[in-house]
Image (cartoon, rainbow, N blue to C red):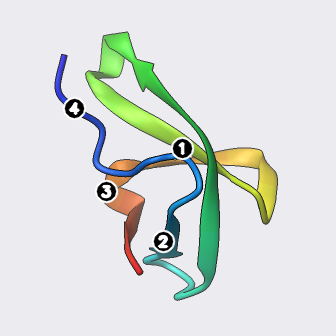
Amino acid sequence: MKKNLFTVGEKVIIKASGKSVTILKCQYVKNMKRYSYVVNEYSSTFFFEEEITKG
């Protein structure tokens, strides 16, 4: 399992929209071998690490 790129509470930017958001929760998706992230501003959906960047 690889290390997650972002931590809870970190400010990041959603690549598709350019919006600044805060990481609420992260979880490793074992069968996809990558992390998913839930953000405060859009708590009903999740983003994979390649969809967000450090802000």
Marks 2 and 4 sit apart, C-alpha to C-alpha, by 17 Å
For the residue marked with disc 3, what is the amino acid? Glu
Above or below, comparing residue 45 to residue 26 in the picture = below
Q: Tell me the mark number nearer the camera, choosing from 4 and 1.
A: 4
Q: Check contact, mark 1 vs mark 2: CB within 8 A.
A: yes
Name the secondary structure under disc 1: strand
Q: Residue at x 17, y 26 (%)?
A: 2
For the residue marked with disc 2, what is the amino acid? Val
Above or below, comparing residue 24 to residue 14 in the picture = above
Q: Residue at x 52, y 88 (%)?
A: 18
Q: Check contact, mark 2 vs mark 4: CB within 8 A.
A: no
Q: Tell me the mark number nearer the camera, choosing from 2 and 3.
A: 2
Above or below, comparing residue 14 to residue 34 in the picture = below
* Residue underneath mark 2: 12
Marks 1 and 3 sit apart, C-alpha to C-alpha, by 11 Å
Name the secondary structure under disc 4: loop
* Residue underneath mark 4: 3
* Residue underneath mark 3: 50
Few, some or many C-alpha atoms within 10 Å of disc 4 (few <14, some 14-19, many ≥20)? few
Of callouts 3 and 4, the N-terminal one: 4
Marks 3 and 4 sit apart, C-alpha to C-alpha, by 14 Å
Of callouts 4 and 1, the N-terminal one: 4
* Residue underneath mark 1: 37
